[in-house]
Image (cartoon, coloured by chain):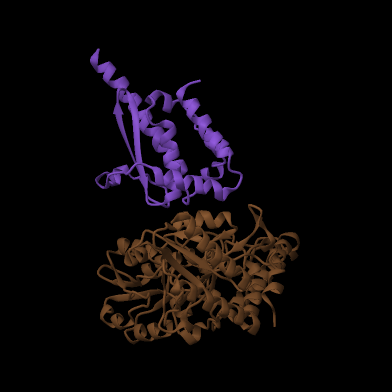
Chain colours: A purple, B brown
Amino acid sequence: MTKLEERKNKVVEDFSLYDEWLDRYEYLIELGKALEPFPEEKKTEDRLIKGCQSRVWLDADVRDGRLWFTADSDAIITKGIISLLISVYSGLTPEEIAGDDFAFIGEIGLRENLSPTRANGLVSMIETIKEISAEAVSRKLGSRLRSK
Amino acid sequence: MMKPLQLREQFPILDTKVYGKPLVYLDNAATSQRPKSVTEAFVKSCNSANSNLHRAVHKLAIDATDAYENTRRRVQEFLGAAHPEEIVFTSGATAAINLVAYSFGEAFVGEGDEIIVTEAEHHSNIVPWQLLCERKKATLKVLDVDDNGELQIGHLKELITHNTRLMAVTHISNVLGIENPVREIVEICHQSGVPVLVDGAQGAVHRRVNVRDLDCDFYVFSGHKLFAASGTGVLYGKRLLLDAMPPFMGGGEMIETVKFSGSTWAKLPGKFEAGTQNINATPTLVPALDLLEECLGDAELAENQESIKKYIYGFLENHPRITQYGRPADIERKVPLFSFKVEGAHHEDLALILDKMGIALRSGQMCAEPLMDRIGVTGLLRASFAPYNTMEEAEYFTKCLDKAIEMLI
């Protein structure tokens, strides 16, 4: 089992403990509160994810060929959701992330939150993570070509 | 006399369960629910009087045209307009405002002219005027609101110059729930010869409107916010003005003669109703307005609305974590539409949790970004009540709101 699969299974397992939606929200709220502090100076327009009712900032660093995400939001449930996404995808290679189908979101019952309405930014968050990964992959290819 | 529970029987959707809990629908300012009489009128139009309007001589065409034109007379009566041809059907309030912004703008607005709007407007009563101003190199001026959400009427006279061509103002703000002194605004504007458009999207829902009493030059509203089918809307305009305005859209119905050397336009209201109209939905305005007038005139329903208004207003005022916006000096001018923020809890989080408790309300900017900027927030929560909402629902809402706040803090 890859690290990514392991992590996704753990999230699905954690969520299966909660039948009630309010309990799931409680869990997301806890995740949101536990998220590492995000520096104020990083809350810039270019890190803001468009298409959310609340404001969500996402930042990515590349270290040792892996992507490390940090994020924040002014809404706590949204912060919980981005925290969950980060816990699954941070520290993986761009190729691993770009190649994933993000289907586990459906398995944990967040599918209804996936509707592409203005009210919910989950789609935008996933799209941004995908974009960042795809960009990192193509940058890597680019630098490989240049080094030849 | 009718009790809210009797009224609810006419709205099948109100029996809906969401996530296993009874639906508590408090998003009425976005759209109201539809009573059986409205869906029946829609089905009847489809099943027994469906034909294109005004064109053919056959029986179905006559029936469909009759239903459509009878609706026009019903709306005329509802608004107290002098003539049926002063009623133009549109797809909604937004379309009606765009029609005026384009057509009135073509006739009367030029470079250096000014249009006045207010800080409390819905985007639909801002953006069409911005587009007009860009097109004509005109200027958009803004009448401000005070911290309680009251229009600063005292500033209006200073704003009006000899270049002012029109003032557009909302009857009741979709965020603040305050009835604006439209009559006074019209009087001030008319002293300087400035016509006034009133956005009645919320106003027509909560107040009896008489356009001749108000003396406004244009009044617009949407059918879907007052029980009718969506895609129905009304523009009232004084005949003199509508006559002087060029067509907005070209097409069938709006012409008198069409020649390649030049065409001539139909008389009012046809001039502004190009193309096939909303044949089946428009007649739903008749049962919708019948029911709305019944609700507005029913003592028991009015008392219920008043009790809910006082209860929610008081709850929000006295809550240590809540700030509400739209606090008129005279509570009589407040309608049961409440926008507020909760200290330490984001509006989106609250709306998501309340949704899971069965409560439908609105969160966000509510299509009034300039007003959000004025208040200094990125968004608010809004609960808006209709005559079919009960005191039990109001109490359930406050209980759930407290529970949601507790979860988040």
Frontmost residue, A9 versus B225 = A9
**Rendered residue at 69%/61% (across/down):** B15
Image vertical order of residue A53 relative to residue A141, above or below: below
Tell me which corner region of the image, top left, top right, bottom left or bottom right, holds residue B306: bottom right
Image vertical order of residue B340 relative to residue B300, above or below: above
Frontmost residue, B216 versus B203 = B203
**Rendered residue at 36%/64% (across/down):** B372
Image vertical order of residue A137 relative to residue A131, above or below: above
| Image side of residue B32 versus residue B100, left or right | right
**Rendered residue at 28%/46% (across/down):** A44
| Image side of residue B163 versus residue B258, left or right | left
Q: Position of residue A89 (x, y in %)?
A: 42, 31
Q: State whether residue B243 appears in this view.
A: no
Q: Position of residue B66 (x, y in %)?
A: 68, 71
Image vertical order of residue A20 relative to residue A104, above or below: below
Tell me which corner region of the image, top left, top right, bottom left or bottom right, holds residue A87: top left
Frontmost residue, B393 versus B210 = B393
Q: State whether residue B98 appears in this view.
A: yes
Residue lying farthest to the top in this orientation: A148
Tell me which corner region of the image, top left, top right, bottom left or bottom right, holds residue A31: top left
**Rendered residue at 42%/69% (across/down):** B320
Q: Position of residue A111 (x, y in %)?
A: 55, 41
Q: Position of residue B347 (x, y in %)?
A: 44, 58
Task: Check the picture and name the quadrant holding the N terminus of chain B.
Answer: bottom right
